[in-house]
Image (cartoon, rainbow, N blue to C red):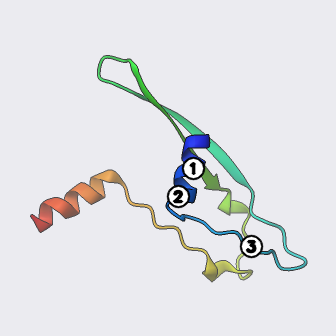
């Protein structure tokens, strides 16, 4: 988890902001994954922090949040088309 938080801070992925009065923050959850090699050996432990956006209320700052996520297959497809 510390490695992931250090990487997001280094890449300036997020920024701290103040919460307007009368609003509650969206809660977050850590997701853990173990990356294994083809032989089944543990290569890396991964962690990511995700927002529980299902608690978000439509109409309250709804258009201010944007998260771009692309699947690796999509990226590979775009690179192969461009080549």
Label 2 and label 3: CA atoms lie apart by 30 Å
In this view of the protein, which residue sits in the foreground, 14 or 50? 14
Relative side of 30 to 46, left or right: right
- As drawn, 61 above or below 41: below
User: Looking at the picture, how far across and down is residue 35, in whole percent?
Assistant: 42, 31
Question: Which class describes the residues within 10 Å of circle 1: few (<14), some (14-19), or many (20+)?
Answer: few
Toward which corner of the image does residue 18 lie, by quadrant?
A: bottom right
Label 1 and label 3: CA atoms lie apart by 30 Å
Query: For numbered disc 2, what is the local secondary structure?
Result: helix
Residue in the image at 61% along x and 42% along y? 2
Relative side of 2 to 69, left or right: right
Number of the label disc, if any, that sits on residue 6: 1
The N terminus: image quadrant: top right
Query: For numbered disc 3, what is the local secondary structure?
Result: loop
Number of the label disc, if any, that sits on residue 57: 3
- As drawn, 66 above or below 32: below
User: Looking at the picture, how far across and down is residue 23, in whole percent?
Assistant: 85, 74
The C terminus: image quadrant: bottom left
Relative side of 82 to 67, left or right: left
Question: Which class describes the residues within 10 Å of circle 3: few (<14), some (14-19), or many (20+)?
Answer: few
Toward which corner of the image does residue 61 lie, by quadrant?
A: bottom right
Number of the label disc, if any, that sits on residue 68: none
Question: Which class describes the residues within 10 Å of circle 2: few (<14), some (14-19), or many (20+)?
Answer: few
Q: Are marks 2 and 1 in contact (CB under 8 Å)?
A: yes
Q: Is residue 1 visible?
A: no
- The residue where tag 2 is placed is 10
Query: For numbered disc 1, what is the local secondary structure?
Result: helix
Q: Nearer the viewer, mark 1 or mark 3?
A: 1
User: Looking at the picture, how far across and down is residue 63, in whole percent?
Assistant: 61, 82
Q: Earlier in the sequence, mark 2 or mark 3?
A: 2
Q: Are marks 1 and 3 in contact (CB under 8 Å)?
A: no
Residue in the image at 83% along x and 79% along y? 20
């Amino acid at each position: 988890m510390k490695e992931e938080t250090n990487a997001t801070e280094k890449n300036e992925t997020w920024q701290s902001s103040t919460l307007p009065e009368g609003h509650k923050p969206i809660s977050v959850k850590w997701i853990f994954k173990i990356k294994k090699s083809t032989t089944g050996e543990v290569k890396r432990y991964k962690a990511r922090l995700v927002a529980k956006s299902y608690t978000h209320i439509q109409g309250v700052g709804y258009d201010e949040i944007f998260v771009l996520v692309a699947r690796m297959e999509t990226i590979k497809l775009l690179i192969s088309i461009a080549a």
